[in-house]
Image (tube, rainbow, N blue to C red):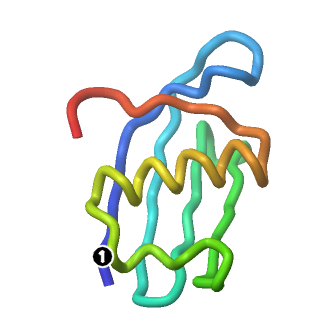
Amino acid sequence: MQEYERQVIITNQGPTSRARLKVIRLPASWYAVIWETPERYASFSQDRTEKNGGHEHMSDDAFLARVQLVAGFTQGIDFEYVGAQ
């Protein structure tokens, strides 16, 4: 299991806003929560499938790009990572 915690800037929910992303990466799945405030948050996840090819072979940067893609696709949340990865 790996955990990632990153500051992000949400770019598509009105004016840009800062938020926090936490991701738990397991061998066959991952789970993430992105939140601006305790009252405003979203969670999303992905399991390994034949179609998505899993994520165990990915570098940290490639994996976090996948998390970003899934957030936009499943939750409609577009964001950018703050600072260097």
Residue occupying image coordinates x 60% and y 47%: 69
Q: Residue at x 78, y 54 (%)?
A: 74
Q: Nearer the viewer, residue 12 or 69?
A: 69
Q: Residue at x 37, y 79 (%)?
A: 56
| Residue under pointer 1 | 2
Q: Residue furthest left?
A: 84
Q: Nearer the viewer, residue 22 or 68?
A: 68
Vertical order, 57 against 15 (above or below)? below
Q: Is residue 67 left or right of residue 7?
A: right
Expressed as whole percent of the image width and height from the top left, the position of residue 1 reads 32, 84
- Taking depth in this image into account, of 84 and 8 the one nearest to the observer is 84
Residue type (three-letter) at the residue carrying disc 1: Gln
Residue 45 falls in image quadrant: bottom right
**SS for tag 1?**
strand
Does residue 81 lie above or below 27 as drawn?
Answer: above
Expressed as whole percent of the image width and height from the top left, the position of residue 57 reads: 33, 75
Residue 53: x, y in percent? 54, 77
Residue 10, located in which quarter of the rendered image? top right
The location of residue 18, given as percent across then percent down, is: 51, 26
